[in-house]
Amino acid sequence: MSRTEPSDLVERGRRVLALEADAIGRVAQRLGPAFAAAVRLLAAAGGRVIVSGVGKSGLIARKIAATFTSTGTPASFLHPIDSLHGDLGIVGRHDVAILLSRSGASDELFGLVSQLKRLGVRLIAITGDLDSVLARQADVVLDASVAEEACPALHPGGALGRNLLLRVGDVMLTGEVPTLRPDRPMRECVVLLAEKRGTVAVVDPAGNLVGVVTAGDLTRLMEKTDAFLDLPVGDVMTRTPKTTTRDELAGAAVRAMEQHGIMALPVLDGGRKVIGIVHLHDLMRAGAA
């Protein structure tokens, strides 16, 4: 920078301003029914405006939320990652959400989009790609595309946009789920553990989950005793295993497995009945991690 001539610096500044001015002019020309629909949606909101984005989009989202608040419209910035760890409690079904993403395929937004749609929150997307997955999920889409960025930056996120809303049900195994009754001997469990990737669900006669036995459980058991083959599975199983449902986000299932150091989760029907099993490796291959 010290070797750059003053005239070069001035020219660069002018070019940036010209690009910004041109982009704003193009946005003005593109304003149409979608803009009016967004305004009507915001005006009709019975709750607050939730604004979210990641990276530079997140900084802009914070500013938008602050501007709404200062002009009398209740608004909050919600970081998409924080939303998956309890902050979603600030969102109500009468809120309206504005989601900002240049690519429309920001992976970090995906979980938030899913949860907002579950709550029935209407979505306004501001994105540079009208054919993006985010745009297709939104109620109203505003075109924020630019011909050239004044200050280009790397955008490593969004490569997995096609996996928006990927759920456990999209990846889980439903055929030949390894299950045993609690009174069956461990010798049967050993065979299933070897053949079925190291996790066996223990169920009652109605198919309800009562426990889980993993390859790790078997290893720890073998360290304690050699006489384990005739032990009932119910004496070895973990009685309060981690589980998931078919509708849970695949990314959330991955986080649970990584947090607790497990390789698979039984998939329940919403109650206690086992309807499948999902493995960490399958989730990773599907792009959930």
Image: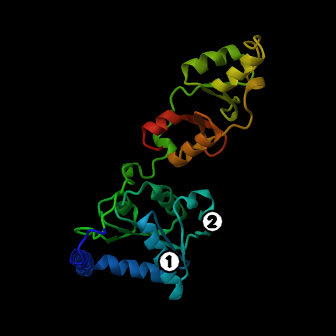
The front one of 239 and 149 is: 149
Looking at the picture, how far across and down is residue 101, in whole percent? 39, 64
Number of marks in the rendered image: 2
Whether residue 268 can be seen here: no
Q: Which residue is mark 1?
A: 65
Tell me the distance, in whole angstroms, between the alpha carbons under discs 1 and 2.
17 Å
Tell me the mark number nearer the camera, choosing from 1 and 2.
1
Q: Residue at x 69, y 25 (%)?
A: 217
Q: Which residue is mark 2?
A: 89
Q: Is residue 164 left or right of residue 262?
A: left
State which tag comes first along the sequence, 1 or 2: 1
Q: Residue at x 22, y 74 (%)?
A: 8
Q: Residue at x 40, y 81 (%)?
A: 39
Q: Residue furthest bottom?
A: 71
Residue type at numbered disc 1: Ala
Whether residue 192 can be seen here: yes
Image colouring? rainbow
Q: Is residue 35 left or right of residue 253?
A: left
